[in-house]
Image (cartoon, coloured by chain):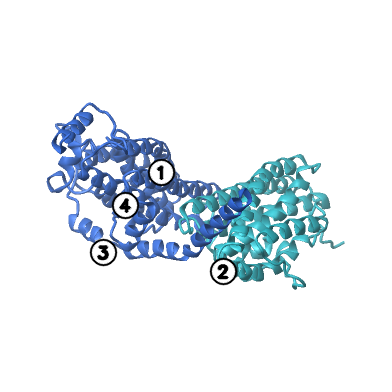
Chain colours: A cyan, B blue
């Protein structure tokens, strides 16, 4: 009988959907943190203010750290169920575009400072809600990583929302740039709330809370919330924008060029 | 007190190892020399972020990526303390940054060399930070208080960076043939420029005598350079690599390593702006500064609005 159900290579028995679901869920969280970290890292040494160069770099470090924790856990799960030898680095450096499950918004180019801080806000406000749910997950490992990441994410929300307010209610130019950033990014927020078949969190239930948070910050920033925007999706299931291929080409170059080398 | 008396009491303080503080009287030349040196040091930290930042997106493992990001971030932090220390001498950070961006102020020439492979992240940490540390350890005892205190903090982080750099190379030196070649190539390219970091020979250095007398410096360029060579010539044995100097040899009589002639023509060329990356580094700094102008303006405008609102509420 042919089936799409993955098979454990050593035992020949089908992998339970639950394990598979957990692996994909964990990879989705890891990929999302890594790709946004990779993008934010582009600011390092190029920030608009030295203190803010340090701040965005801090966030980058948090995201890379979160990605590492999730990848390490995913590797443990995969190795236990499929008799493989995955590591945090094989998962980050040796998978291709179609295997990455990050949210589309994370892979978009940084744009200007307005687009960067707005993306951080829209994403972190969502990630905070996801992590709060996962913190109470019956899976102890995921719950522990979520609890640790949540503290960092709460700071990311605070930092980025302050920038959204500052730029929205700053000068005419900063306001125009923020409006343009909303126009660019808003259509990538719908994907947050469309559940992928592996998601353990009922993400569609988070939409209202997220929206209220965004609306209150936009109000303080004197910015309008867009209405009736067509929403893009696909990242969660590995259908990406054209940007991801270039991100991976750059990020993975040494691991791909020198297979098997230790660094 | 006459100027002459002030100068005598100033030198007495220096001689009895009492730190000079921002509000103390100091000779104008002492102020200028410190300002030039501290701001130059701050600029070096900031420009130095660029060649290392160049490899963040391509770091070969997540652990190495995190270490590299943290390191570049440390450099930004060092830049901050040093700008603050320099500001105590009466020049604003904005002015210092403007002088850097216009090309008027200098920064360490070493950062005008390109980082061409991953091994350069190791070589920069081991050799460039290693050379910088010898200078900085000395500066922890420099006579100007704010500079000395900033250096104490910076030295702790820098010695950590140097160890990380060495460890990066150590892993490469035990790796595949390609990795070992990469490691040797990086050492070949960074060795001579790091020797140049100590500045011209004592016999050619214009600022040295007065700086020694004022205890801004406590060791000469040549003394520090020799100390560095002696240290690295030993450490490289652990890597199983070689330094690109046929004349490098232990001299039992001097109890120091002898070494070959530095290419001073190259040194002055890079100082004058003709290094491989001088234009690129300055262009990158200017781009970040110019593109950040609207962000800084918006932050100030918003802060002013907030202040008005609070004032109105209070009234």
Residue B243 can be seen, yes or no: no
**Residue under numbered circle 4:** B190
Which residue corresponds to the image point at 19% horizontal and 49% vertical from the top-left? B200
Query: In the image, residue B131 lies at what x, y percent?
Result: 31, 43
Discs 3 and 4 share one subunit: yes
Nearest the camera: B17 or A35?
A: B17
Q: Which numbered marker is on residue B250? A: none
Determine whether the residue tagged by mark 3 lies in a helix, strand or loop.
helix
Determine whether the residue tagged by mark 2 lies in a helix, strand or loop.
helix
Q: Are marks 2 and 1 in contact (CB under 8 Å)?
A: no
- Give whichever of discs 4 and 1 has the lower sequence position: 1
Q: Residues within 10 Å of mark 2 (few under 14, many from 20)?
A: few
Give how far apart the Cα atoms at labels 3 and 1 are.
30 Å
Give how far apart the Cα atoms at labels 3 and 4 are.
17 Å
Give the letter of the chain under mark 1: B
- Give whichever of discs 3 and 1 has the lower sequence position: 1
Give how far apart the Cα atoms at labels 2 and 1 are.
33 Å
Discs 2 and 3 share one subunit: no
Residue at the extreme left of the image, as rendered = B203
Single out the mark in the foreground, 2 or 4: 2
Single out the mark in the foreground, 4 or 1: 1
Up/down of A179 relative to B221, above or below: below
Residue at the extreme front of the image, as rendered = B315
Single out the mark in the foreground, 2 or 1: 2
Query: In the image, residue B229 lies at what x, y percent?
Result: 25, 41
**Residue under numbered circle 1:** B81
**Residue under numbered circle 2:** A172
The image quadrant that residue B6 belongs to is top left
């Amino acid at each position: 009988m042919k089936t799409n159900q993955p098979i454990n290579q050593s035992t020949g028995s089908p992998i339970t959907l639950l394990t598979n679901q957990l692996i994909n869920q964990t990879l989705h969280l890891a990929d999302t943190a890594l790709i946004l970290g990779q993008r934010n890292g582009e600011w390092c040494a190029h920030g608009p203010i030295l203190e803010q160069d340090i701040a965005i770099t801090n966030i980058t470090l948090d995201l890379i750290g979160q990605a590492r924790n999730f990848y390490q856990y995913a590797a443990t799960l995969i190795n236990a169920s499929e008799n493989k030898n995955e590591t945090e680095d094989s998962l980050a450096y040796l998978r291709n575009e179609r295997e990455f499950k990050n949210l589309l918004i994370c892979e978009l180019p940084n744009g200007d400072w307005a687009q960067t801080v707005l993306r951080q806000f829209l994403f972190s406000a969502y990630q905070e809600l996801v992590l709060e749910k996962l913190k109470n997950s019956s899976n102890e490992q995921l719950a522990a990583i979520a609890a640790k990441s949540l503290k960092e994410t709460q700071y990311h929300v605070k930092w980025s929302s302050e920038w959204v307010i500052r730029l929205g209610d700053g000068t005419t130019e900063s306001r125009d740039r923020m409006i343009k950033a909303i126009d660019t990014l808003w259509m990538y927020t719908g994907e947050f709330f469309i559940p992928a078949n592996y998601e353990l969190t009922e993400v569609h239930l988070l939409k209202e809370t997220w929206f209220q948070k965004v609306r209150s910050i936009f109000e303080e920033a004197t910015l309008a919330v867009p209405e009736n925007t067509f929403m893009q999706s696909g990242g969660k299931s590995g259908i990406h924008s054209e940007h991801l291929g270039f991100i991976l080409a750059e990020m993975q170059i040494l691991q791909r060029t020198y297979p098997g080398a230790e660094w | 007190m006459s100027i002459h008396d002030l100068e005598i009491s100033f030198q007495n303080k220096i001689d009895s190892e009492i730190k000079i503080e921002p509000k103390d009287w100091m000779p104008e030349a002492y102020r200028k020399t410190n300002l030039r040196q501290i701001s130059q040091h701050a600029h070096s930290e900031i420009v130095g972020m660029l060649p290392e930042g160049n490899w963040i997106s391509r770091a070969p493992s997540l652990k190495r990526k995190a270490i590299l990001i943290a390191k570049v971030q440390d450099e930004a932090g060092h830049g901050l303390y040093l700008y603050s220390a320099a500001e105590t001498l009466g020049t604003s950070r904005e002015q210092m940054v403007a002088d850097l961006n216009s090309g008027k102020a200098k920064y360490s020439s070493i950062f005008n060399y390109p980082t061409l492979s991953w091994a350069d992240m190791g070589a920069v940490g081991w050799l460039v930070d290693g050379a910088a540390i010898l200078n900085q350890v000395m500066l922890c005892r420099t006579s100007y208080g704010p500079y000395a205190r900033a250096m104490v903090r910076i030295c702790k982080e820098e010695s950590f960076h140097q160890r990380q750099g060495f460890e990066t190379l150590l892993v490469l030196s035990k790796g595949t043939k390609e990795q070992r070649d990469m490691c040797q190539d990086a050492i070949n390219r960074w060795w001579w420029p790091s020797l140049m970091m100590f500045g011209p020979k004592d016999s050619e250095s214009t600022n040295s005598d007065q700086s020694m007398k004022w205890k801004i410096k406590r060791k000469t360029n040549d003394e520090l350079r020799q100390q560095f060579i002696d240290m690295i010539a030993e450490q490289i044995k652990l890597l199983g690599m070689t330094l690109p100097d046929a004349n490098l040899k232990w001299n039992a009589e001097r109890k120091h390593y002898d070494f070959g002639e530095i290419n001073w023509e190259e040194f002055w060329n890079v100082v004058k702006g003709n290094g491989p990356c001088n234009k690129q580094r300055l262009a990158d700094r200017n781009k970040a500064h110019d593109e950040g102008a609207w962000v800084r303006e918006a932050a100030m405008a918003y802060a002013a609005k907030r202040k008005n609102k609070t004032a109105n509420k209070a009234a």
